[in-house]
Image (tube, rainbow, N blue to C red):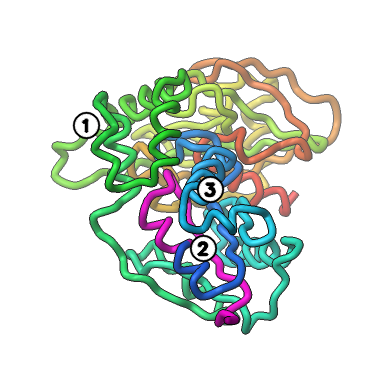
Amino acid sequence: MSKQYKVAIVIGRFEPFHNQHAALVTKGFAIADKVIVLVGGAFKPRTPKDPFTFEERSKMIQGWMSLSVHSDYSNSRELAIAPIRDFMYSDSNWAENVQRTVAGIPGFEAANNEIVIVGCNKDESSFYLKMFPQWALHEEPYNEHIDATQIRELLYDDRSLDFLKGAVPAATLSFLREFKETEVFKGIVHERDVVAKYRKSWERAPYAPTFITTDAVVIQSGHILLVTRGSAPGKNLLALPGGFLEQDERIVDGVIRELREETKIKVAAPVLRGSIRETQIFDHPKRSSRGRTVTNAALIVLPDGPLPKVKGSDDAVKAAWYPLGELSSEQFFEDHFCIIEYFKSRV
């Protein structure tokens, strides 16, 4: 008996892959010949919110498939798992990336009226389900008792994982048991504890504070000036030179001060100030794990020529020039790669 659709699409972060996700994939196979699982938040560094790589999440999904009633479909002809990166400041770019990915998977070609998205309308974060009017939408009931955020928090607690048996497939549980014994896991827990301590320092404030920061996007001769963070959160990740705005300074003053403090760049402050080509606010509510943080970024374009000497200082263990064409999103702290992408087109 032929099914209603040729291809079902299931989109999620799968941090980790749990029973609600498994139910969506199961429904996809019930109504379509083939299923594409799109793993969001790919090509990012590990954080307490996103602790698993794309390959690890794919392993969880494939492990569940090999042990489930769908074992006959656990090969590449009926199941495809593909990564999708985040575009924090452009939903349209994200949707285009989804469309291109789906269209580019060999053996899963289908007309728009033969494709269905299978998902749950969980909350405002499920808005993406309505972004593809060319495809049908099948909504499954949301199980409020299974939540990836709670699973991660329980995972980070120093206790047995037996309590997760009712929330995640056996393959996921097996993976988590092994993952919890790694040094990588210990590093993630440390970062989670650092952020928790940071947030606790202002939890008694009558209102949740909004922090103002500055970032400098300094470009010269096809290179960009970056620092390597020296402490958690984001230890050893690349970042734009920047930091918190002081109480008695204006935005541009904060940009120049933080830039010079963190990189010791051998360019006079008046020259840096005069080279500012554009400023932009980046204010995604979830851009920082430390709390509501709005950054004011300035694009500073220096004249072509020898790259000025720099040296890491203050919160940066290293400062260096990097070719713009050699950057990748998994190298970067928070949304700094997205900020660089925004300004690259303006140089």
Closer to the chain start, of discs 1 and 3, is: 3
Residue at position x 84%, y 35% in the image: 304
Q: Amino acid at mark 1?
A: Lys
Q: Which residue is mark 2?
A: 10
Crowding near the residue tagged with mark 1, few <14, some 14–19, many ≥20 C-alpha atoms within 10 Å: few
Crowding near the residue tagged with mark 3, few <14, some 14–19, many ≥20 C-alpha atoms within 10 Å: some
Q: Secondary structure at mark 2?
A: strand
Taking depth in this image into account, of 76 and 322 the one nearest to the observer is: 76
Q: Which residue is mark 1?
A: 200
**Closer to us: mark 1 or mark 2?**
2
Taking depth in this image into account, of 117 and 80 the one nearest to the observer is: 80
Q: x, y (%) of residue 229?
A: 52, 23
Residue 189 visible somewhere in the drawing: yes
Taking depth in this image into account, of 167 and 95 the one nearest to the observer is: 167
**Circles 1 and 2 in contact, beta carbons < 8 Å:** no
Q: Quadrant of residue 324?
A: top right
Q: x, y (%) of residue 267?
A: 69, 24
Magenta residues (range): 1-25
Q: x, y (%) of residue 276?
A: 65, 43
Residue at position x 70%, y 67% in the image: 108
